[in-house]
Image: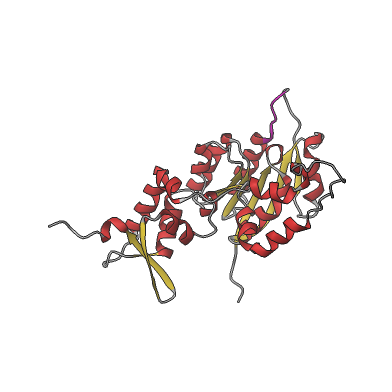
Amino acid sequence: MIEKQARIALLIDADNSPASKIDVILAELAKIGVTNIRRAYGNWKKDGLKGWENVLHEYAIRPIQQFDYSKGKNATDMVMVIDAMDLLYTDQPEAFGIVSSDADFTPLVMHLKAKGAQVFGFGAKKTPSPFVNACSRFLYLENLGAATREADEAPAEKTAKAKAVPRRKPRAGAKTEAPAAEAVPEVAAEASAPLKQDSTALKRDARLVTLLRNAVESAAGEDGWSSLGSVGQQIGNQASFDPRNYGYRKLIDLIEATQLFELDRRGSQFVLRDKRQARPARA
């Protein structure tokens, strides 16, 4: 018997989102369920949306035309809100995917969650925190897919790429100059990729530290240890969170990098506890 999958409605603010990330967005939503409603909103007469026009048919995304009613302000967000409310009470999907960096969608997200739907947000790092925190989970598009490519690429492959960059031989008697930046696009691309935050940076993030410690404490058993799965569930219930926003593919990698928790492996699962609890009591 085929298990019923969660139905997802994906609504894209094409005016404020890059088309180059649509494949990884759909891949993320596929982990949750099936995205059977796919709509992209914008004024398709604008040259800036040409990138989206090229992927609409490929990914079966329905374009929704919305003209600008006033100069300098698009009406896309209002139409998306109306459609989201209509879908909530008619098609009743279990989850919504909202692709935008506009904080104006914050009240919509809060309403959808209040009615029992999960909301997965996708936007740029400039996205205001109220919208980010309102989502069930929010992923920064700059990070999405980058951490995976960096981890999957073997050092030998990186070396091969660097060697593959063609270099011109200097003319006889000519001075040797450093290669121009555009001559090594692979290196430039890697430099622009999001870097993992180190232990010091993670410890300085008061919100992250509080979130992790509260989740570990809430999931603790009688022996004071918490299973990693329970910690992840606690975090998901508390806030919008994804370890990739900090440069880590998995929650366990992020937790280990903070150096705030003691980790142990019991059978096939990891358990952890706050290092402060492991300290011996003073006499």
Q: Position of residue 32 (x, y in %)?
A: 58, 60
Q: Nearer the viewer, residue 13 or 270?
A: 270
Q: Position of residue 234 (x, y in %)?
A: 40, 56
Residue 12 relative to residue 198: left or right: right
**Which image quarter holds the N terminus?**
bottom right
Quarter assignment of residue 181: top right
Instruction: Please tell me whether residue 160 is drawn above or below residue 186 in the rendered image.
Output: below
Q: Nearer the viewer, residue 166 or 173?
A: 173
Number of marks: 0
Residue sitting at the far right: 172
**Which image quarter holds the C terminus?**
bottom left
**Going 37% across and 47% down the picture, which residue do you hit?**
210
Q: Nearer the viewer, residue 277 or 162?
A: 162
Instruction: Please tell me whether residue 32 is drawn above or below residue 116 in the rendered image.
Output: below
Q: Nearer the viewer, residue 173 or 103?
A: 173
Which residues fall within the magenta stretch?
A: 72-76
Asked whether residue 267 appears in the rendered view, the answer is yes
Instruction: Please tell me whether residue 169 is drawn above or below residue 281 in the rendered image.
Output: above
Residue 264 relative to residue 128: left or right: left
**Magenta region's main secondary structure?**
loop
Q: Position of residue 3 (x, y in %)?
A: 58, 71
Quarter assignment of residue 268: bottom left
Q: Is residue 184 magenta?
A: no
